[in-house]
Amino acid sequence: MSLTEPMPAGATGPGPVLAGNDAPPRPPFAQDWRRIARMGAVGALGQIFIALSNMPVKLDGRAIIEGILSLGYLSLVVLPFAVGSRVGYQVRREGVPFHRPGAYEVVGGTACGAVVGGGLSLLAILIANFDLREPLVNWSPILADLLAFNRGTAFAVLIWLVVGAAIGAFGGLLRVIPPLAKRIMWTVVLTLFGAAVLESLTTDLAEGMGLEGPVEWFYAPRGGLTVTGAIALAIGSAVLAVVGRGRVKGAKARIDSLEGPARTRAHLGLILATGAVLVILPMFAGKLTNELLANVGLFVLLALGLNVVVGLAGILDLGYVAFFAVGSYSTAVLTAAASPRINPELPWFVALIGVVILTGLVGLFIGAPVIRMRGDYLAIVTLGFGEIIRLLFLSDWLSGWFGGSQGITNIPGAEIFGLAEVSGTDPRSVFYLVLAFCAIAIYVSWRLERSRIGRAWMAVREDETVAEAMGINTVNVKLLAFVVGAVLGSFSGAIFSAKVGSVFPASFLILVSIVILVVVIFGGMGSIVGVIAGSAVLIGVLGGPKQPGLLAEFSEFKLLIYGALLVWMMLARPEGLIPSVRRTRELHQEEMAQDAWLRGQAADDASGDDGAGHHNGSHATSGAAARADGHSGPGADQAGGEPA
């Protein structure tokens, strides 16, 4: 999308016009009704799918605001809002009028939202008149009462048309209101939702700090924010949105503008502050919160290892769970007295040395046969190797070594230099151990990314053929990525076995690899901070394959949400939640070059005088001739030759 704006009608001159010269708003009822019908129909089908999956019924028990809004009803109003906001979206292109937002967007959002809400109205009629239980077994009969607010089918038909239209109109209104009002609205909404999601974490920390009184004022006894607490949070977040406008971006810009030792000191200060918070926080938290933090930390370790393989080297490894399994089983064999055949009962830190060596060899074993494959073939083969490792641990052939389906039990905890024992009975100590290894993994990843090896990985990721032509030994570089990723994954496996006290083949399903890959993609491939943020959001809120998160109600639907997040991420933000700067530039290189070219032309046109007018005109004439011939210059759209 270009940063420049189209030239208004009647203006003269060869180049694009800078922002601020938009065309007048469109007439309110000059809608593209086919587009509205198409988008509304897609949204209506999505609404019906969400309702029949029984998600609203399962989530209705989780209140956002007591007596007003629950998570179940929130799941039914997301699509009307999204479609109503999207229907009036315009792409800024040179030569195409960009109309200022107005009543057109609100009318379009209202109509589209009404169509989406009509999907639930139709579903209410079908539920009342037909028996859908046999072909659609997931939905619950309680859904009919939920859709009708316990007032009958006719009310359900009418209310969802009205609600859909109102929510769609609100989505369209967001394109009209000033940026400050939009900022306040989003800040209030995200604050209320975040406070409701983090209720268990907040109450746990408040109890540890002796602040039960204020928390009881904000949260209702049965869950959710109280009305007075929600109002107070809304007012406070709105004030912060106004007062803090631009301050965060300004602070980030000041840090980014620093160079040399000053920049290093600033980053070091942020790291130390974050580390201090992570060290102090578990001291006031209970067992459930520390257990959640430990689970998130284990997935951070796994995601950091996969980030080296996928994010830096560009190797799509779908069998990464194999390294997690090898780390867990090798730790169990070397430390547990109940290990079937080999039981040296080594101390945990001594056994960790053998675990690292063994897992590195497994990384070489898996990487060597597949290293010359690329793309889908490589992904399928690594997927197969991941399943082979799990089935070997499960097989009767090796049951004398690894216990088969019975696994290995009675694994001792991790002794820290003989001073303390880390086990699942003390989640706080487990979290501190995970935190220490996460710090090691972050430092190793950061140093490797900025080293010669890291640059070689990124060259292979972008174009392996060109990297090989430049003299990079692609085979050795990719094998090294496998080994580093395997070692980081083995750390998580070793801690996992000491934490749980037993290992079974069922803990290492292929689903674990998929979830870790989703975390890396969602957070931002190649970004250490992004991987940590992705783990905190996905694992902390939704939970892992078998680990609960803050929203335990999503346990049945987490895979559906993972899939929806991946689709949205690939379409809207392929670089991830917190991307690395290099990765962002690589993904948007063509777009940035196009904008630079258009800005350069605009600057030439603005600085041109009478003597230079002929020169600028010749550029415009040659550009017009190129477009007339069907050829495109820099930044031109391939379909029509026009600059995008």
Image (cartoon, rainbow, N blue to C red):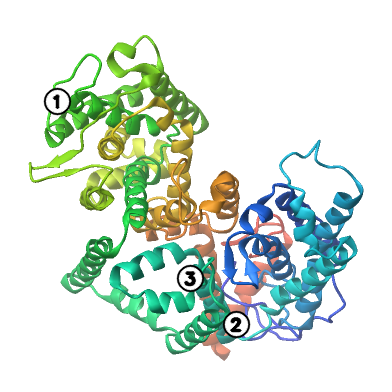
Of the pair 170 and 147, the residue shown nearer to us: 147
Instruction: Tell me residue 288's x, y (percent).
Output: 36, 54
Compute the Cα span from label 2 to label 3: 38 Å
Compute the Cα span from label 1 to label 3: 46 Å
SS state under label 2: loop
Quarter in which the N terminus is drawn: bottom right
Compute the Cα span from label 2 to label 1: 70 Å
Instruction: Tell me residue 70's x, y (percent).
Output: 63, 65
Task: State which tag comes first along the sequence, 2 or 1.
Answer: 2
Quarter of the view holding residue 71: bottom right
Residue that protrudes farthest toward the left in the picture: 418
* Image-based side of 293 in relation to 272, left or right: right
Q: Which residue is mark 1?
A: 345
236, above or below 567, in the image: below
49, above or below 407, in the image: below
Q: Which residue is mark 3?
A: 195
- Mark 3 neighbour class, 10 Å CA radius: few under 14, some 14 to 19, many 20 or more: some
Residue 536: image tag: none
Q: Which residue is mark 2?
A: 19
Tell me if residue 372 can be seen.
Answer: no
Pointers 2 and 1 in contact (C-beta within 8 Å): no
Instruction: Tell me residue 625's x, y (percent).
Output: 69, 65
| Residue type at numbered disc 3 | Ala
| Residue type at numbered disc 1 | Glu
Quarter of the view holding residue 579: bottom left
- Mark 1 neighbour class, 10 Å CA radius: few under 14, some 14 to 19, many 20 or more: some
Pointers 1 and 3 in contact (C-beta within 8 Å): no
SS state under label 1: loop
- Mark 2 neighbour class, 10 Å CA radius: few under 14, some 14 to 19, many 20 or more: few
Task: State which tag comes first along the sequence, 2 or 3.
Answer: 2
| Residue type at numbered disc 2 | Ala
For the point 81% across and 66% down, the residue is: 160
